[in-house]
Amino acid sequence: MGITSFHEAARLGEIIIIALPWSCLKDVLETIDPAYLRNKTIIDVSNAVHFDNGPRLLLQDTSAGVIVQKLLPESNVVKTLNTISDKIMIHPNFKEGSPIMFMCGNDNSSKDQVRALLKDIGWTTVVDLGDIRQSLLQESIMLACVISEINLQSPGSAFALLRH
Ligand SMILES: NC(=O)c1ccc[n+]([C@@H]2O[C@H](COP(=O)([O-])OP(=O)(O)OC[C@H]3O[C@@H](n4cnc5c(N)ncnc54)[C@H](OP(=O)(O)O)[C@@H]3O)[C@@H](O)[C@H]2O)c1
């Protein structure tokens, strides 16, 4: 593994993960030749969120995932992992049980690819919410999770679906 430019990473990568602050994401994507990203699976973990004066979503009636897909119309954007702290993105082990990981995107084969990757890094419960417009739900869930962590003084938390 090495460090390279965004441009080169996009050219060489088979699957691309976008993990950029919202404030620079558009500018960075515009530096990349779209041909390098054409037909590739793009995992978008970004959140358009503001933390000053209490956490809140920056976008109204749309979502970061939808905007990333619009910026990369020839790529297959899959939104996932945005709801969880980077410290527990891999091998999420919780004493209480298995947290849930959501994903959404327009291309089913890219979602299958991402599901397999998520399984490899320890996510046993993955729910496909639908097309990329459902990114709005995931970004709202992220915010609800952050507020819950603050209220309950419980950093590094994750949502789980409790079953009978
Ligand atoms: N941190 C988390 O726990 C977490 C969890 C879920 C989702 N997310 C989302 O993931 C995204 C990244 O979060 P993060 O916490 O990893 O952010 P970050 O550490 O602030 O930034 C990630 C990387 O983006 C690059 N970067 C920052 N500003 C840049 C600029 N102006 N131009 C070009 N590159 C720049 C930097 O790369 P270089 O170091 O190479 O400059 C940096 O390492 C956000 O949208 C966030 O909401 C974060």
Image (cartoon, rainbow, N blue to C red):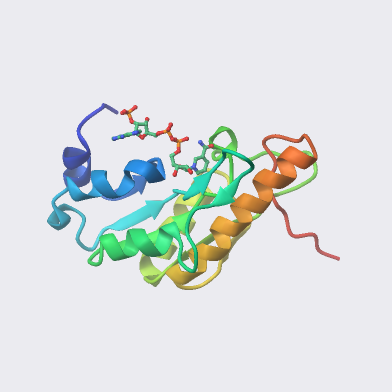
**Residue 44 at x, y percent in the picture:** 40, 52
Residue 124 visible, this orientation: no
Indicate the quadrant containing the C terminus: top left, top right, bottom left or bottom right: bottom right
Total residue callouts = 0
> Hey, which residue is sitting farthest right in the picture?
164
Indicate the quadrant containing the N terminus: top left, top right, bottom left or bottom right: top left
Depth order, front residue of 56/123: 56
Is residue 64 left or right of 134 when viewed as pictured? left
Depth order, front residue of 54/45: 54
> Hey, which residue is sitting farthest top in the picture?
2
Is residue 93 left or right of 10 when viewed as pictured? right
Q: Is residue 38 above or below residue 5?
A: below
Q: Residue drawn 25% across and 67% down?
A: 73
**Residue 27 at x, y percent in the picture:** 25, 46
Q: Is residue 78 above or below residue 61?
A: above
Is residue 102 left or right of 38 when viewed as pictured? right
> Hey, which residue is sitting farthest front in the picture?
53
**Residue 28 at x, y percent in the picture:** 25, 43
Is residue 33 left or right of 73 when viewed as pictured? left
Residue 147 visible, this orientation: yes
Depth order, front residue of 64/77: 64
Q: Is residue 34 above or below residue 55?
A: below
Image quadrant of residue 52? Answer: top right
**Residue 131 at x, y percent in the picture:** 45, 72
Image quadrant of residue 93? Answer: top right
Q: Residue drawn 48% across and 49% down?
A: 47
Q: Residue drawn 52% across and 64% down?
A: 136
Split into quadrants, the picture shows ligand 1 in the one at: top left
Depth order, front residue of 91/19: 19
